[in-house]
Amino acid sequence: MPAPLSPAQISEIVEMALSDHISFTQISAQHGVTPDEIKVIMRTELKPGSYRAWRKRVRDFGDRRAHYK
């Protein structure tokens, strides 16, 4: 990561990533982290089952959006 993130920033990134209405691009623009770094943060902050459920939801949402464009 470019600079160490404060606990408040990490909490905000997790909250934004859990939202279905905020994209990785918006999180990256606001906090300067890449989508891969967001996934690492989520993996460390969430329980394993919660992380897997979140990844599945993100993948399914992305697949649906691509299908409906």
Image: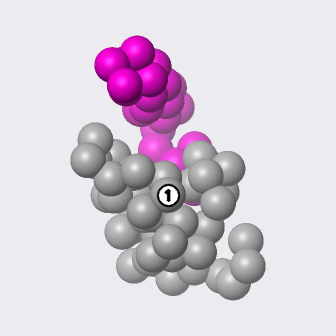
Total marks drawn?
1
Q: Picture quarter containing residue 30?
A: bottom left
Chief SS of the magenta region = helix
**In the picture, which quadrant includes the N terminus?**
bottom right
What residue is drawn where x is 69% and y is 84%? 3
Note whether 52 is above or below 11 in the view shown: above
**Residue kind at label 1, given as amino acid type:** Thr
Residue picked out by circle 1:
25
- Element type where label 1 sits in the image: helix
What residue is drawn where x is 39% and y is 79%? 8
Classify residue 17 as left or right of residue 39: left
Q: Position of residue 62 (x, y in %)?
A: 44, 28
Q: Is residue 16 magenta?
A: no
| Range covered by the magenta-colored residues | 40-69
Q: Picture quarter containing residue 50?
A: top left
**In the picture, which quadrant includes the C terminus?**
top left
Q: Position of residue 4 (x, y in %)?
A: 66, 82
